[in-house]
Image (spheres, helix red, strand yellow):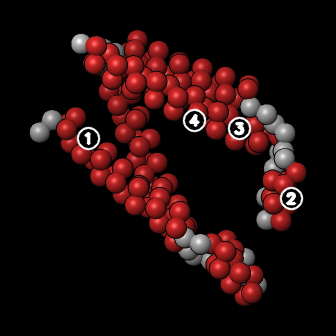
Amino acid sequence: MGLHKILKIVVGVIGVIAMIFAGIVWTIDSEPLQEEVKALGINAVDVPSSIGNLMTIGYIVLALILVLVIIFVIKGLFSGNAKNVLIGVGIFLLVIAISYFVASDAIPEDIMKAAAKQDIELTPNIMKWVGAGINSFFILAATAIGLMLFSGAKKLVK
């Protein structure tokens, strides 16, 4: 079995697990947990919860994805596809740069109040990077969807 087929299976399994965990997170009602924490006078950060455990799993999956991406980028560089890899990295950095410069650094009043209640320091730079992350996600998602539609339409024409 080729590496491509093994990776497809691994991606499929991770995708199914991610959907299950997303469903669990979406169905958890955090309001009773917050009320119990307030009644006990405990800092919410100290309370272990299933959401925290799922976030840990998310970080582990993200780390695995980053390691795999780095490995395949390096493999692509050494297999003679350096030009294509560098073009891809350049386009990605361009998307990040465009997203950053389009993002707003304004802090909405309700977010500032919520951050102040939890002793979280928000700066315009932090808000700009959050906006850049959201903008780049939408740009990359729209590009991926557009390319999938284009590929499907191209196959239908043939």
Tell me which label, 3 or 1, sits earlier in the chain: 1
Q: Residue at x 57, y 28 (%)?
A: 139
Tell me which label, 3 or 2, sits earlier in the chain: 2
Task: Judge the density around disc 1: few (<14), some (14-19), many (≥20) Cα neighbours within 10 Å.
Answer: few
Query: CA gap, disc 1 to disc 2?
Result: 45 Å
What label sits on residue 80 in the rendered view? none
Q: Position of residue 18 (x, y in %)?
A: 41, 55
Q: Nearer the viewer, residue 12 or 83?
A: 12
Q: Which residue is labeled 2 in the image?
A: 113
Tell me which label, 4 or 3, sits earlier in the chain: 3
Describe the element under mark 2 as helix, strand or loop. helix
What label sits on residue 137 in the rendered view? 4
Type of amino acid under label 2? Lys
Q: Which residue is labeled 3 in the image?
A: 131
Quadrant assignment for the N terminus: top left
Type of amino acid under label 4? Phe
